[in-house]
């Protein structure tokens, strides 16, 4: 059967059950000599009751639970939890191999959004990003992504409605596992694909590969600049990926999936917030079905940027609006100084 075998050097060979479909769990229980209906029970205990280990599943006989006690479900433990005034909760979750990742629960009217990590660390090294400063450690497995959503759902005691891949890591560098996690979040956890956003700086060919999975997820591209020269200063990996090629691939995504593109643009004072750059951005995005999200920079210790003034932010917005570009200003939620991606983890290590 197709179970995920974790054989990386950082983990022993185990078969976590989280991420398996009803059919796969049914096969697994049968392989353990149990009747097929136990598969349905296991599925409900994993995805609805939030069982952390097979030992918790009291509808199973003690004897059987004892015999399969070494099979993990694949859940993390909450290592640290920080609540902010606006209700946002940031979690540091400890994985089985001791690595720690960030996940964030963001409540708003009729919504609960989870910002998930896709990797431990990140290799992209964007100059303003706390995660990028720490380098890449490893990819997350599908169950480690799904677990973040279940953990927030259980902690809030409220169903998660939206998932954004805007935590630690570059999701398209871990595309296979991200797609598996998206499918399970959709089918097993019950989150609509349209309520899932995958955010990327862009890796050549990978947006196309994502499009070929024919998912209905929203693609967000972290552009941060309207031209190749400035973009390469902020996103070092852009050197291998001309901005026009990136936008061509995004155009394909929109065409194949029929979904509108989100464009993320971190606003850095005096670097990429000049109204002329807004004008250039509007030209670049002409004819595209997009929504631009401007994210005023969240100061991090390791970088020497400033957040633009409200007046400068407004000027940038005004230029885009005059050019009929749909635009929102999105402040990173929660916890003031540690609101930016990767910052909570960075601070905890110190
Ligand atoms: N690697 C992916 C997803 C993770 S970052 C990507 O780059 O899209 C999610 C978003 O947070 C990105 O748009 C990123 O540019 C933004 N971000 C990172 N550090 C930030 C900071 N210090 N202030 C504001 N936004 C930040």
Image (tube, rainbow, N blue to C red):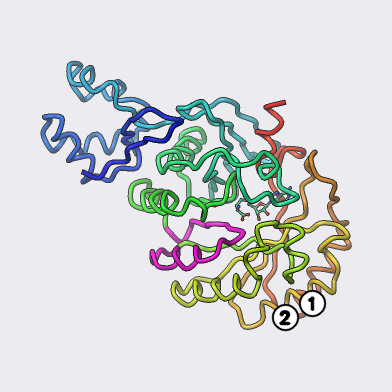
Is label 2 within 8 A of ligand 1 (CB to nearest ligand atom)?
Answer: no
Percent across and percent down for residue 168 are: 59, 44
Q: Is residue 199 magenta?
A: yes
Q: Is residue 151 magenta?
A: no
Q: Residues within 10 Å of mark 2 (few under 14, many from 20)?
A: some
Picture disc at residue 6: none
Q: Which image quadrant is residue 36 in?
A: top left
Q: Which image quadrant is residue 6 in?
A: top left
334 or 208: nearer the eye?
A: 208
The residue to which callout 2 is attached is: 283
Relative to 69, is 84 above or below?
below
Answer with left or right where residue 46 lies relative to residue 169: left
Answer with left or right where residue 303 lies relative to residue 203: right
Q: Residues within 10 Å of mark 1 (few under 14, many from 20)?
A: some
The residue to which callout 1 is attached is: 279
Percent across and percent down for residue 192 are: 42, 57
Query: What is the spatial separation of the Cα atoms under label 2 and label 1, in whole angstroms?
Result: 6 Å
Answer with left or right where residue 252 lies relative to residue 182: right
- Of the 4 image quadrants, the one containing the N terminus is top left
Percent across and percent down for residue 342 are: 66, 40
Secondary structure at badge 2 equals helix
Residue at the spot x=79%, y=77% of the render? 279
Q: Which residues are magenta?
A: 193-216
Relative to 266, is 214 above or below?
below
């Amino acid at each position: 059967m197709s179970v995920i075998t974790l054989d990386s050097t950082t983990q022993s060979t185990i078969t976590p059950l989280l991420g398996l479909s009803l059919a796969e769990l049914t096969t697994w229980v049968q392989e353990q000599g149990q009747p097929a209906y136990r598969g349905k029970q296991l599925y409900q205990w994993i995805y609805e009751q939030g069982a952390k280990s097979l030992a918790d599943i009291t509808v199973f006989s003690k004897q059987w639970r004892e015999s399969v006690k070494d099979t993990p479900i694949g859940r993390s433990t909450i290592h640290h939890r920080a609540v902010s005034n606006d209700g946002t909760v940031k979690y540091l979750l400890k994985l089985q191999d001791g690595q720690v990742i960030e996940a964030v629960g963001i409540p708003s009217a009729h919504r609960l959004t989870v910002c998930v990590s896709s990797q431990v660390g990140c290799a992209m090294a964007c100059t303003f990003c706390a995660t990028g400063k720490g380098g890449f450690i490893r990819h997350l497995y599908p169950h480690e992504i799904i677990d973040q959503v279940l953990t927030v759902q259980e902690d809030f005691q409220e169903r998660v409605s939206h998932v954004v891949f805007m935590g630690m890591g570059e999701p398209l560098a871990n595309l296979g596992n991200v797609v598996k996690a998206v499918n399970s979040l959709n089918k097993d956890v019950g989150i609509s694909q349209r309520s899932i956003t995958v955010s990327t700086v862009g890796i050549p060919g990978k947006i196309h590969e994502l499009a070929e999975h024919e998912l209905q997820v929203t693609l967000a591209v972290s552009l941060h600049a309207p031209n190749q020269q400035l973009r390469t200063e902020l996103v070092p990996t852009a050197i291998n990926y001309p901005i026009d090629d990136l936008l061509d691939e995004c155009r394909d995504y929109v065409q194949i999936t029929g979904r509108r593109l989100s464009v993320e643009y971190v606003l850095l004072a005096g670097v990429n917030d000049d109204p002329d750059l807004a004008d250039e951005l509007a030209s670049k995005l002409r004819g595209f079905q997009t929504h631009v999200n401007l994210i005023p920079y969240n100061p991090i210790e390791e970088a020497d940027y400033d957040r633009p003034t409200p007046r400068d932010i407004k000027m940038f917005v005004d230029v885009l609006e005059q050019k009929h570009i749909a635009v929102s200003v999105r402040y990173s939620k929660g916890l003031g100084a540690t609101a930016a991606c990767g910052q909570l983890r960075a601070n905890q290590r110190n």
